[in-house]
Image: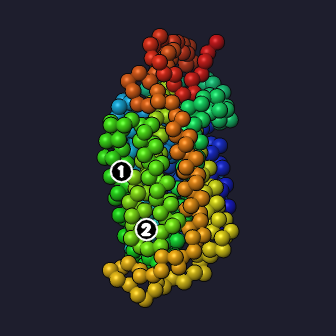
Amino acid sequence: MNGLIHGIKGILSFLSAPLLGALSDVWGRKSFLLLTVFFTCSPIPLLRFNPWWFFAMISVSGIFSVTFSIVFAYVADCTDENERSTAYGLVSATFAASLIISPALGAFLGSTYNDNFVVALATAVASLDILFILVAVPESLPERIRPASWGAPISWEQADPFASLRKVGQDPTVLLLSLTVFLSYLPEAGQYSSMFLYLKQVIHFSSEDVATFIAVLGILSVIAQTLVLTCLKKTIGLKNSVIVGLIFQLLQLSWYGLGTHRWMMWAAGSLASVAMITYPAISALVSCNADPDQQGVVQGIITGIRGLCNGIGPALFGFTFYLFHVNLDDMPTTPPTIQTNHTMMEDPFSKNMVVGAPFLFGAGSVILALLLAFFIPDNASLSGNSRSPTRKEYVYSGGTLDSVTKEDTSDNVPLLLQETS
């Protein structure tokens, strides 16, 4: 049931993210930020009323729960190109920080009070989030780019999600980046769905060990996506930062798959934190090579691919565990009795290699992503000239949005550039 729900949600996100991103390029970010946050949080109160309605709402919410594409487009509106990768890293890092706090906090409050209290508190936090956006978050899209009102005419071709997907195939750089995101995030999504159960059942982590692992990994990922990504961007550029992130992801997945001891899992976790720089680096790379009026659609494409991976990845990992007869629910949960300094003293060959097969298959997918990343053009990187030869300026004429062009001597053509006759 869980795999079916997330599969439906992922497919809906894949189809809707470019559409919502394109609409936010026309009508502004704030309204769509409210919409996506509302539908992302709306299933929470249904947990205590009707579980089946909760499952249904989780599935349907995939149409609108694509907050990242709107947020990254918002960031692109508010930042210069030389600050964008740092800003994207900060957004991803705050998401990681919420993952550090929320599981432990929810478990503590649930044991201290009850589950109803946790659901009520989560609903209240979600409501405050929506109120904060409504009251304190300004519109980021300049008035000269968007229509004066929701009733102004727009080009529905721009908002067509399938037209947006067709443009991916027409632009080789976007196609390479999209395939890189798919091949790298597919094992990452599957890993998130099973990693902590794998640690408990196969590596014999206790519940306290798993909680500590989550906290340490979260803290390291915050550091990696802010300080490390900023340093890498300044020294080697965004393309090479993506390659570095993929290399670390390949190493950590291989270590997870072949590791037999606890210290190996901790070491692999430290590598995983650095691997998390890949997505914000790709998002910054895409953003810096897109026109201001196309930030929403290009970020929507990347976010949609991530949503698709969130649906396929867990099912793929679960099927691989099943294929190799690894039933995590039925495996013994008690560790061997001989231990020294929390490191299990066991035969390193006692764990069958196929137990970690999903992680090894994931490493193979990352190898393909790494090969594709090497073919990303060098000019698709952060530079001061990454703009179109015919930059668009928008003016109002009779309540409609018209475009005029300006000459620019840049050598780089923005991603998803739309030619006009």
Q: Is residue 154 left or right of residue 70?
A: right
Please state which of residues 54 and 216 is positioned toward the viewer in this rendering. Answer: 216
Q: Residues within 10 Å of mark 1 (few under 14, many from 20)?
A: many
What residue is drawn where x is 64% and y is 12%? 421
The answer to whether 307 is drawn above or below residue 98 in the figure is above
What residue is drawn where x is 58% and y is 54%? 364
Q: Earlier in the sequence, mark 2 or mark 1?
A: 1
Please state which of residues 326 and 87 is positioned toward the viewer in this rendering. Answer: 326
Q: Quadrant of residue 265?
A: bottom left
Q: Which residue is mark 2?
A: 265
| x then y, percent, for residue 384 | 38, 24
Q: Looking at the rendering, in which quadrant would you find the N terminus? A: bottom right
The answer to whether 340 is drawn above or below residue 255 in the figure is below
Q: Residues within 10 Å of mark 2 (few under 14, many from 20)?
A: many
Circle 2: residue type: Met
Please state which of residues 95 and 34 is positioned toward the viewer in this rendering. Answer: 95
What residue is drawn where x is 48% and y is 11%? 406
Circle 1: residue type: Ala
| x then y, percent, for residue 220 | 35, 57
| Residue 224, numbered circle | 1
Circle nearer the viewer, 2 or 1: 2
Please state which of residues 285 and 71 is positioned toward the viewer in this rendering. Answer: 285
Q: Secondary structure at mark 1?
A: helix
